[in-house]
Amino acid sequence: ENKRINDIAAMKKPDLNKVKETLQLTDFPVQLTTELTTNCNLKCPACPYPHLKRERGAMSDALYKKIVDEIAQKKPKTTLWLAFMGEPTILGKKLFEKIKYAKDKGIEDTSLNTNANLINQEMIDWIFGSGLDKIYISIDAATEESYKKIRAGGDFQKTRDVVLALMAERERRKLDKPEIFAQFISMEENAGED
């Protein structure tokens, strides 16, 4: 763990002046990340989740609806990103009811990050029924050996199968959405696999 901290500290620092040049002031966020749950089914070494001391739980329906209603009223083009530290699919069908609520209210872009380990065929049906626009599946490895180091407690083959099942289902339904992304963050454990 100390080696990882030292590696991060040694990384080249970005030129903040160049970053500032790309920033634009807007009257409302162009992207809003919501943490629907603080629970996760994995204990990935690179993630701070296992070390967080805050209370575990789920966002209330009332707060979620308030957020969505405000986005819908003020700027429906705002991307509603449904993930942060927790694993949203822990919520089961309720997650996809929340996505559908946002879509029914006129939110134009909904995105979901997931480790996909809890997704089954029933959940795939809910994904397509919700109107979800994008799904990012954190796989972060090309081999089972690397995956086990990065996604502690996860199942590489299941995650891979979920990506393929989502692609097949989207093709079967002749849909363009959700867009499906296999997310890969380069790190020491998966060096050379990207």
Image (tube, rainbow, N blue to C red):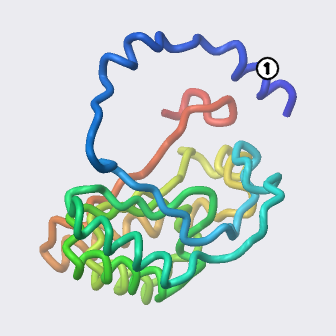
Residue in front for this viewpoint, 44 or 83: 83
x 23%, y 78%: residue = 105
x 47%, y 88%: residue = 93
Seen as rendered, the residue at the extreme left is 174
Task: Give above or below for 161 relative to 147.
Answer: below
Q: Is residue 189 left or right of residue 173?
A: right
Seen as rendered, the residue at the extreme right is 2
Residue in front for this viewpoint, 63 or 18: 63
Q: Quadrant of the N terminus?
A: top right
Q: Position of residue 22 (x, y in %)?
A: 30, 22
Residue annotated with mark 1? 6
x 72%, y 18%: residue = 9
Task: Give above or below for 31 relative to 118.
Answer: above
Q: Is residue 107 left or right of residue 156?
A: left
Q: Residues within 10 Å of mark 1 (few under 14, many from 20)?
A: few
Q: Is residue 70 left or right of residue 122?
A: left
Residue type at the position of mark 1:
Asn
Q: Position of residue 148 (x, y in %)?
A: 71, 52
Q: Position of residue 3 (x, y in %)?
A: 83, 24
x 29%, y 48%: residue = 30
> Secondary structure under badge 1?
helix
Using the rendered view, name the quadrant where residue 152 is placed. Answer: bottom right
Count of picture labels: 1
Residue in front for this viewpoint, 3 or 36: 36
